[in-house]
Amino acid sequence: MVENSAKIEKGTLRFRPRARLLYLLGHELISDETIALLELVKNSYDADAQKVRVKLIDVSNKDKGRIEIRDNGHGMSLDTMTTAWMEPARDNKKGTDGQRDRTRKFNRLPLGEKGVGRFSADKLGLRLEIVSRFCRFDPKTKGVAYLSPEEVVVVIEGRKFLEEAYLDEIECPWQTRAPEEFKQDDHGTLLRISELRNDWSEELVQRIHLGLARLASPLSKAEDFQILFNSNEYTQLSGRIENPLLKNAPYFLDGVIDEEGVMSYTLKGPNHTKKDKMDLRLGHEHFLVGKGKDLALRKPACGPFRFRLYAFEREKRLWKKFGMDKEKLELLNALAGVSIYRNNFRVMPYGEPGNDWLYFDRRRVQNPGKVLGNDRVVGYVEISQNLNPQLRDKTNREGLIEEGAAFADLRDLAIEAADFLGLQRYMSVPHKKRSKEKIQEGKSDIEAGSQVVEKSSARAKETIEKASKDVGEGRTEEAKTALGQAAAEVKTGEEATKRIDEGKNKLLEELAVSEEQIDNLIALSGIGMSAERMTHEFLRAIKHAEEQLQKSLGILNREKASKEIVGLITAAISQLEIVRTGLQQMEPLYYSKRKDSELLNVAEIAQKIEDFHSNRIRDLDAQVSIIREEPELCVDMGKGHLMQVFDNLFDNSLYWLKFKLNEDRRKITVKISGKDRTIVFSDNGPGVDRKIEEHLFEPFVSTKPEGRGLGLYIIQDILENYKAEIELLTENKLLEGANFKITFREE
């Protein structure tokens, strides 16, 4: 039977969490032992500690092992212990105004933000003993203004949190006592964790050691915060935590990127050091704001930051030169990557194995010249809560929130800095010039050495035969003299053999460099052939689509269909015709079409390529002038090759003209002279970066963010095959930007 009257009541409900919720949250927020230990060390940093000691005792056996983390920070009073440590998710590091209070001694901004670091101890073991002696630092003298006469001891049994009890029913015993751990003037906190959840392998301990080595930023002063490590089982890891590899890096870039995106840097290589500035926003379209006269580069949303990057060589003949060995290479495998630090402390997981947040490996396939492999770089990016408020931590403290402009700008600027270092490394010895010179040096060494060895061997043979004859005839002194001469000839031969080895090594080194370049060129040629094949298929498909649309249009006209539908189909046919015409214009660029030479009017080809880029020219409101000086310049070469030359020059100019910020109209001027047999191609964009002028025509050298650095190299190669040359003009320019002069020698 159903009740006829409803019972109307009101009230409030309260959550009453079970104790196991703490365990579940901890295991969700703290992913592994490395993260857990790092979070506890961060707490020591927040407590104004100068030193923290991490001690691992018998950790290979979870039942016997224990972990101790001891610091000399300000410690915790009983009141702090009960109101801060024992209240999960409480952020006790904010002041009454909601802003984060700096620490009293070192003026640090606390790293712990959401009160979750305390879950870390539970991740490591089931039993935690906290011993702490509180002090108050004087912010002026940096000394101790007050020292508590007792220390506080709290014991937390993790097993209780696995029971069915409610969280507020779990009791954790505490006591105050005369100092036993922190005697005399000592102060700080000791965390003693036992009943470990897992046996710790040597691999895990090494991983934690490496994590600690990267925890504190090397950009901060060493005396500010030191981590000391001790293990009774893995004694080779004991001592002060530091990165031992950095002194072996042959290339080093240290800099600051200001709020405008301008990098001030110091660059060091094996034989040079230089300081300069450069705007890292150039080349990135998403930094452009406004239109026309109001066009400008916006400020990066991430704010200013510091960085330091170290680049290493991994080729065998090179890493030995810089003091590396197999053991150090293995260490580099573990430490390689670019880490992010906030207020001198590491933000995980950036720079961890497998975390290639700057896309080194993916981009290196596209441009092996300027892009370092992730396994060749150790880097540090330093942000702060004060200067980079838009860069916020994820809730689980593992990483930054990557959605939005702030992180995207940080990534782009860091990529530009890293690629600048990679390009400087690549250009440290010009590849093309170096190849020819060193191959010739190697050949000369081998030839000269071989001649010396041959002559020395012949003379030594004659001398030994003479000595043998002298001995047989009793002329001992003459035999001794002859043998001495033979020994000298052998020594000369040995020296010549060394020269042959040097020549061989030079040739081997050049072969290795060439092999790397050839591999990448082969990969790119494969992409080109695929593109050519797909273009042919695309042209056929477009032609078929046009035919079908024309038939449909005829039917619709006969059926007197709506003008709107007819208009849409007509517009679609027009667009397909534009695409087809453009693809057909570029057909001569295909390899199969480039081989045949013919007499070409250079100005007509330049005009054809201008027409091909007409949409881009119109979008930029650029003025293109093709000046034809009599007589007309005609050259005998492959049509596709000449089109490729102009296409690359137009493409480069139109790309960089986007970053012309002054009020002058964007311009491209092409001056073609039949009398001088020259082409001068110029624009009024930002011009060629002077740092790469000397290496501009080498493969894989580019300052475009996504550039391969092959365009000008290929142009130069094409022109050389037709007895022509290209050069960058730095004087007598037509326009103030980039100016290239092509000269065709008399036939």
Image: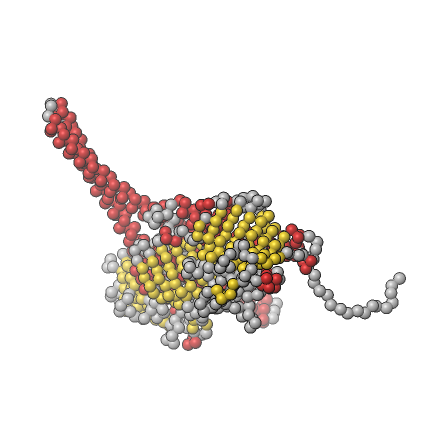
Residue 346 spot, x, y in % from top left: 48, 58
Q: How is the image coloured?
A: secondary structure
Does the image show residue 340?
no
Horizontally, residue 452 falls left or right of residue 477, namely right
Residue 150 spot, x, y in % from top left: 56, 60
Observer-nearest of 704 and 159 = 159
Q: Quadrant of the C terminus?
A: bottom left
Horizontally, residue 461 falls left or right of residue 667, namely left
Considering every residue shown, the one lying at the far right of the view is 1
Q: Residue at x 40, y 44 (%)?
A: 326
Residue 78 spot, x, y in % from top left: 59, 62
Observer-nearest of 636 and 521 = 521
Q: Residue at x 55, y 73 (%)?
A: 97
Location of residue 486 by image quarter: top left
Residue 142 spot, x, y in % from top left: 45, 66
Q: Quadrant of the N terminus?
A: bottom right
Q: What count of labels does the image hold?
A: 0
Q: Residue at x 11, y 28 (%)?
A: 477
Does the image show residue 386?
yes
Observer-nearest of 83 and 588 = 83
Q: Residue at x 29, y 69 (%)?
A: 733
